[in-house]
Structures are given as structure tokens and as C-alpha cells.
């Protein structure tokens, strides 16, 4: 996702480490291509995944896809991924995922949560940038939000104290906080946004969010060239919707629940989840995904918009240092959207089918 840059001056870190989590360490196959695990997903996932495969083939991207089935298994009451899928992702170190639907009423945990826990995907990276040709009430949006992905209120620690009284525990640890905050600093360097903003509510949750804030202060000492600021969550919510330009040159990082809400809010500024790329970083494995739903109501009708999955795949290519391929595909997608409603899908107030949109992207490569 980023390249490691040399420091200009020696700093003695408080946290010792020999490896910064989130880096891609995969190798090319003997044929000069990388193998990427493909989780097509449910509903419209098959159609938008096919669009990605067709565009990659036309662009001659050095990628070989390895499709896997992630239909969940319920073992001893616990939602589990098929072993073949786990093996594929761990072998290839990178995956592209379409939307997944969690089975309803069968005792299954969220599939996205299962993936995060299985591969320890500690950080969710959500860039949101205005799309030329698709107008919203906000112009020139260019935000980056990094969300801690493994704990907080989503740790799943909750129980009934007495009937009618439920307690849910928010878990914040120094190791998890340090990992995602350090990743935020490294990511800020890699995209030339030398300003990290920690979003929190330590004014109320003095111990939990206080630990997150204090960890950021310690990690920040190792990055003297990057400005570090702190902002209360409610203040960020107000300012981001009032004028997103205030956040153009910063990388926001925050605990899990805040990041979940604020990342979707950011997506709304540019037109919704159908235009938003997303990447989940693990210690060694990374999974890039379309964060919108599986839209079963339009599945198989040729109406789906593959933009989010395509832009997420461009994030994946940059993570793999295939920057030229990423730029070529991203530019073709954005050119297609900007060309007019006849080449945009219905969710973008256009008339194009999935196949027509795909064909136009290929023409614009």
C-alpha cells in the first residue's frame, strides 16, 4: 500500500519492531505474473467481478486470478471460512473481494467480520475523492480515513446482566492502537499528506480513547516530519460536512466504531459507496473490497456498477507496486464516468448496462 521511506534523522523508537505491518511481500510467478485470490461475492458480485476480469485482460495487467468460494461453515457455533479459501489468501497475500451477504437467521457472524478476524485485518483504508462528471453538493473532496479494524465496540464482548440490561464492552489495547497509528503515519508519508489527525472521544472515554490518543503521541515522536493533531469526533463530523476541504491534506485515523461511521459519511460526500474504494491491511495479508451491498434485487439484470470494485482493485495494484497499471485503469474508469450519462450506470443517473460500462472503460484504456 505504501513504500517505506528512509528517515532524515535517527530516532530511537519507544516501540521496537523489525517489520511494519501492512506491506506487500508477495513475489511474481515464474511467468512474470502475480496470483491474486478473487472472492466474487454474492448478488451482483459475480457481474462486477467479471467486469474487473475483462478490463484487466484488456489492459494486460500481470495478474492471474484464483477464484475461491467463501460460503461460510458453522463449526461448533462459530462462523468459519472454508480451508481452501484461507489457504489461497495466505498463499497469495492479497485478495480482491466483491460484496458478501451474511446468511440471515442461521447463527452466522458477519462475513466481513469473519474475514477481518481470520486474517487479522487491522486497518481499513478508505480514500474518498470527488469524481469528475458526477456532481454532488460537495466539490473537490479528497479525504483519507484509516479505521482500526479489530477491536473497540466491535470486539463482540457483550452479555446480559439481568433481563432487560445488556452490557457491551469496548476493548482498546496498546498493541492494536500502535499498529494502526503507525500504519497511518507510513501511509501519510507514502501519499505526501504529512499530517495525521487522530479522531477520538477521550473527553468522555478517558481510559479507552485516552489510551489510543496517548499511543499516537508516543508513535508520533518517531515521525518528526509529520504533523500530528487531535480532534473530537463530533467536531470532525460537523466540520467534515461543512467543508471537506479542511481535510484535504490530512490522513485521519480513529478507533473502529468511529471509523465505520465516518468512512460511510465521507463516501456520501462524493456520491455513495458505489464510487468508494476500500482496502483492509493485515500483518501480511491484504484484502481489497467493494464496500457496497450485494444488491440481490438487481443481480443478474446487467444493472450493477463495477466502479467501486475497479477502484479498489487499483488500490490493490498500488499496494503491489503496479502503479502504471493502476493509473491506466483508474484513468479509464474516471474518463468513462465523465463522458456522460449514456456511459454511466443507473445508480449514477445514467442509462448504461454493466457490460456497456465495461466496454467503454476498455475503449478508454
Image: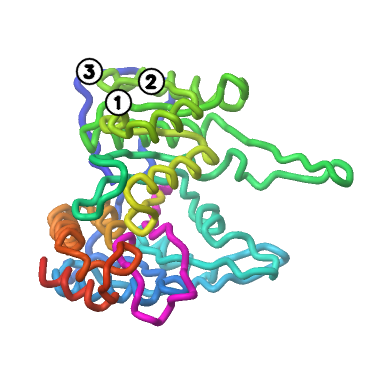
Q: Is residue 215 visible?
A: yes
- Residue 57 among magenta residues: no
- Quick one: 65 or 297, which is closer to the camera? 297
| 58 up-or-down from 96: above or below | below
| 66 up-or-down from 323: above or below | below
Give the Cα distance between marks 2 and 3.
22 Å
- In what element is the residue under mark 2? strand
Neighbor class of circle 1 (other Cα within 10 Å; few <14, some 14-19, many 20+) is many
- Nearer the observer, disc 2 or disc 3? 2
> In screen coordinates, is 24 left or right of 284?
left
Give the Cα distance between marks 1 and 2.
8 Å
- In what element is the residue under mark 1? strand
Location of residue 113 in the rendering, given as x and y in whole percent from the top left corner: 55, 55
The residue at which mark 1 appears reads as 195
> Are the two marked residues, 1 and 2, in contact with CB atoms closer than 8 angstroms?
yes
Label located before the other in sequence (1 or 2): 1
> In screen coordinates, is 223 left or right of 234?
left
Region rendered in magenta:
281-308
Which secondary structure class fits the magenta region best?
loop
The residue at which mark 2 appears reads as 229
Give the Cα distance between marks 1 and 3.
18 Å
> Are the two marked residues, 2 and 3, in contact with CB atoms closer than 8 angstroms?
no
Residue visible at 51% across and 35% down in the picture: 255
- Residue 288 among magenta residues: yes
- Quick one: 335 or 117, which is closer to the camera? 335
The residue at which mark 3 appears reads as 9
Amino acid at each position: 500500500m505504501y513504500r517505506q521511506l528512509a528517515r532524515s534523522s535517527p530516532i530511537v523508537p519507544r516501540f521496537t519492531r523489525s517489520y511494519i505491518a501492512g506491506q506487500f511481500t508477495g513475489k511474481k510467478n515464474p511467468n512474470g505474473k502475480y496470483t491474486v485470490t478473487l472472492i466474487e461475492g454474492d448478488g451482483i458480485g459475480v457481474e462486477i467481478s467479471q467486469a474487473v476480469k475483462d478490463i484487466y485482460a484488456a489492459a494486460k495487467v500481470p495478474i492471474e486470478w484464483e477464484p475461491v468460494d467463501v460460503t461460510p461453515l458453522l463449526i461448533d457455533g462459530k462462523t468459519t471460512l472454508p480451508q481452501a479459501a484461507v489457504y489461497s489468501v495466505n498463499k497469495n497475500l492479497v485478495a480482491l473481494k466483491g460484496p458478501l451477504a451474511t446468511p440471515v437467521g442461521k447463527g452466522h457472524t458477519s462475513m466481513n467480520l469473519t474475514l477481518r478476524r481470520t486474517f487479522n485485518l487491522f486497518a481499513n483504508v478508505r480514500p474518498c475523492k470527488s469524481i469528475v462528471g458526477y456532481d454532488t453538493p460537495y466539490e473537490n473532496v479528497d479525504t483519507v480515513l484509516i479505521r482500526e479494524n479489530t477491536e473497540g465496540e466491535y470486539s463482540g464482548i457483550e452479555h446480559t446482566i439481568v433481563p432487560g440490561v445488556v452490557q457491551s464492552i469496548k476493548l482498546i489495547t496498546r498493541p492494536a492502537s500502535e499498529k494502526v497509528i503507525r500504519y497511518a503515519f507510513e501511509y501519510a508519508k507514502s501519499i505526501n499528506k504529512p499530517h495525521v489527525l487522530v479522531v477520538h472521544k477521550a473527553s468522555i472515554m478517558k481510559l479507552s480513547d485516552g489510551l489510543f490518543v496517548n499511543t499516537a503521541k508516543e508513535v508520533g515522536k518517531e515521525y518528526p516530519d509529520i504533523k500530528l493533531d487531535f480532534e473530537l469526533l463530533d467536531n470532525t463530523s460537523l466540520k467534515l460536512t461543512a467543508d471537506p476541504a479542511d481535510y484535504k491534506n490530512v490522513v485521519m485515523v480513529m478507533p473502529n466504531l468511529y471509523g465505520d461511521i465516518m468512512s460511510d459519511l465521507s463516501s456520501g460526500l462524493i456520491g455513495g459507496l458505489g464510487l468508494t474504494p476500500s482496502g483492509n491491511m493485515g500483518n501480511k495479508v491484504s484484502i481489497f473490497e467493494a464496500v457496497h451491498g450485494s444488491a440481490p434485487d438487481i443481480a443478474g439484470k446487467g444493472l450493477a456498477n463495477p466502479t467501486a470494485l475497479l477502484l479498489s482493485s487499483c488500490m490493490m495494484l498500488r499496494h503491489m507496486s503496479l502503479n502504471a497499471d493502476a493509473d491506466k485503469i483508474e484513468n479509464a474508469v474516471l474518463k468513462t464516468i465523465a463522458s456522460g450519462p449514456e456511459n454511466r450506470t443507473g445508480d449514477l443517473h445514467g442509462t448504461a448496462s454493466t457490460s456497456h460500462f465495461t466496454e467503454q472503460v476498455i475503449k478508454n484504456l
